[in-house]
Amino acid sequence: MSYGWYRAQFQGATGDYIDLGFNTFGWRIAACVFGTLCIPMMYLLARRMWPNRLFAIAAATLVCFDGMFFIQSRIGMIDIFPIFFILLSYFLFMVHIQSRTFNASMLSLVAMGTVLGIGIAAKWIVLAAWASIVFFLVVRIVVRSLNIDFGPAGWPFVSWRRDGGSGISKALWPTYLAVALIALVVIPVGIYVVSWYPFFARGQFHNLPDLITYQVQSYNYHAHLVATHPYGSPPWSWPFLARPVLYYAEYSGLGTDVFTGQPLISRMSNLGNPWIWWASLPCVAALPYFIIRHRSFLAAMILLGFISQYAPWFPVTRVLFMYHMFGGLIFMVLALAFVLVYLSEKLPRPKRELLVAGFLGMAVFFFGYFYPVWTAVPISQSAYIEGSGTPPWGPKLWLTNCRDLPASQPQIFCWN
């Protein structure tokens, strides 16, 4: 829409603004903007979660150089939008629980509910963030009422003690609960209903029951869909990058590789950065240790966020794809940055910075290595698949357990 307005005002184009943006630029620019904003948003969230600049830099850098974040920010899919709103909602959650005045606490609570409502209207996966945040708010009330200590003294996340000095502890609980009900229920539901206004405007919906019926039908469609896809994959395989989705491929008409003399081919898939994804797995597995041994609120928040974004996919019986791991990837990145910086803190300066910089440098290297896979840059086939003529910069496809299977059977550990 804004691009159409720009064309009409400054380029002399005519027609409806929305039509002037109905092109590849119009389809992709919003995703590009929101995907770019995910980087500073991750930095701000990490700084709120743990006031450690190294942790925030590590988390933001990992987002910047991950393949799935990169490619989902460049194509006309909606998945990057809920990811941004999940990041923003958790940031506002941290602002809320760290507020020192009643007004700041209430304002951040309303802002958080508004962002959650927008995110849920974009895609239902934000419901998992809503559930996690509500869970932590309930637990917060319980531990305050019981005057329970959680976390070592001096940790600057949030005081869980009744006498911790937070303005929220001085507020009347009925007032707080009333505002919380408005912020976390009324506002999100209102935003979700309003987001369907175009359906009412063009006569597809006539009343609220029509909207409710449509939601039920949408749920039933996905719950009972029987379909297959050659790039479908089960949820357990996603963290291992077992089956990325091929978004684009061109195998002819691209010219000849000047180095190998082979025809050029072009491919684009949503492969994550293996250095980031595979390194994050033991870090996620280690989070219970930090929760139990160190009573870490940060580790608990990351773990619950990961579980809430990942576990709901397992009961789903319809065909699923690896990009459904996107919500869980947020917390895989946070877990990796958390454990990396925690280990680096054991070292003296400047070794701790060198350790983190070295790890992030490898992430950047792998990003460059797999760059053609994420951008469809034409390269020779031998640079994609290992063989007798593979050049030094290949292969790009490591997992090649690809067999001649019907579409109903997923190809696992196959990057072809």
Image: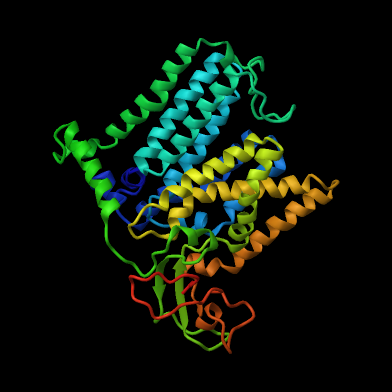
Of residue 158 and residue 311, the one placed in the foreground of this image is 311
Q: Kindly indicate the quadrant of the structure image that contains residue 321.
A: bottom left
Tell me, yes or no, if residue 46 can be seen here. no
Given residues 221 and 398, the one toward you in this image is 221
Q: Can you give x and y, in whole percent of width and height, for residue 355 in the image?
A: 77, 54
Query: In the image as oriented, which residue stretches furthest toward the right?
Result: 348
Q: Position of residue 156 (x, y in %)?
A: 69, 29
Above or below, comparing residue 5 to residue 359 in the picture: above
Residue drawn at (63%, 61%) of the image: 275
- Tell me residue 254's x, y (percent): 43, 79
Residue 161 found in image quarter: top right
Looking at the rendered structure, the number of numbered marks drawn on it comes to 0
Compared across the picture, whether 131 is left or right of 15 comes to right
Is any atom of residue 43 visible in this view? yes
Question: Colour scheme in the image?
Answer: rainbow
Judge left or right: residue 272 versus residue 279. left
Q: Residue at x 63, y 44 (%)?
A: 288
Above or below residue 414? Residue 137 is: above
Quadrant where the N terminus is found in the figure? top left
* Rendered position, 389 above or below 399: below
Residue at position x 42%, y 53% in the image = 314
Q: Residue 227 vs residue 111: left or right? A: left
Decide: is 351 above or below 89: below
